[in-house]
Amino acid sequence: MTTASTSSHPARPDDEPVPIVDAHHHLWDLSQGHYPWLQEDYDPQRFFLGDYRALCRDFLPVDYRVAARGVRVVATVHVEAERCRDEQVAETAWLHELNEKHGLPRAVVAHAWFDRPDTEERLLQHLQYPLVRGIRSKPVTAPSPAHSVRGQPGTMQDEAWLRGFSLLERYGLSWDLRVPAWHLADAAEVARAFPGVPIVLNHHGFAWDRSEDGLRRWRASMAVLARESNVHVKLSEFGLRDQAWDWHANAAIVRDTVAVFGWQRCMFASNFPVAGLRISYGDLVHGVLRMLDGLMPSERHAVMCGNALKFYRIDPSSLPYSIHDEVSN
């Protein structure tokens, strides 16, 4: 895959390698599973980064390791990759096969719809696999802040959706929350209603509108969500449609996110291979480390490693080596 990098802050030769837990990445084998968005339904107009033709090929553990070469990745979390929804449990089973063969991922965030009659059945099927830690299920959202879908079927106010969501607490599962910034206040209502469900916001809440007004609205919405102590956030996916990856703008997003949530509830995530459309893995990691240079070393370690281990319940003693060690062997 061709990657674009605009990082002007490469790692110094004397930098001590930092252990990384990648809290969000994807894998797919187009010959083993059906991924409509990568195959027959390719549609760059609907994809938030625009053209994504470079993603329409296999991305397997060997590809991840090559991308992460030179970075001390010690564990990864796989988040469901929009595999065909009648293959939800098959994706989980396949990921466990990869773990057995390749040592990654170390945790799995699976998919299940919350508003379907078979929600509990699907959750129980996923829970037959020991690496499953949570669910990512995207609610119905509005296409822009000017539109409203509030209360419609599949939204975060839908009673059927909320009944399904309540099962997460019963079964000890977390929720990976992925919504545009104009739905963060809605997500805060869900978090407040279910304080026992650990929630992690994907991709910093998508600060897509980088205008002064847009960033002000994003920060205000993030502050509302951050009031709920069960909500965490992933420092990930800063790419914008048809724009290069911008160090200074993205550094401000990272620092604002940490300021709002506190370092204790932030975790690094690569979103590879998707983020590879804009930046290389190494530049992303070293860039985020520079963005966190105002933190103490122990705090940076928590953001880059420790917080994700705790949130996704990954046993540190189960990590005998860095993933990148196998690349050179």
Image: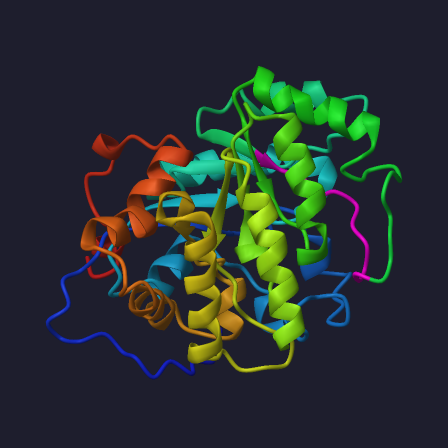
Is 7 rendered above or below residue 315? below
Residue 243, horizontal then vertical, whole percent = 59, 82
Q: Nearer the viewer, residue 222 or 277?
A: 222
Q: Nearer the viewer, residue 155 or 111?
A: 155
Q: Position of residue 95 (x, y in %)?
A: 49, 39
Q: Is residue 254 left or right of residue 74?
A: right
Judge from the rendering whether residue 146 lies leftward or rightward of residue 83; answer left or right: right
Residue 24 in the image: above or below residue 313: below
- Residue 138 appears in the figure: no
- The image's colour scheme reads rainbow
Q: Which residues are magenta?
A: 135-145
Q: Residue at x 74, y 42 (%)?
A: 139
Residue 268 drawn in magenta: no
Residue in front for this viewpoint, 175 or 93: 175
Q: Is residue 281 left or right of residue 49?
A: left
Magenta span: chief secondary structure: loop
Residue 46 in the image: state x and y as whole percent: 76, 66
Q: Is residue 61 left or right of residue 161?
A: left
Q: Quadrant of residue 320?
A: top left
| Quadrant holding the C terminus | bottom left
Decide if residue 60 is in sight here: yes
14 or 228, which lies in front?
Answer: 228
Q: How many marks?
A: 0
Q: Is residue 189 above or below residue 34?
A: above
Residue displayed at 67% across by 22% down = 166
* Residue 151 picture location, percent across and down: 87, 38
Residue shown at 27%/54% (left/top)? 300
Rendered residue at 81%/22% (across/down):
117
Residue 25, placed above or below residue 41: above
Q: Is 141 included in the stretch rendered in magenta?
A: yes
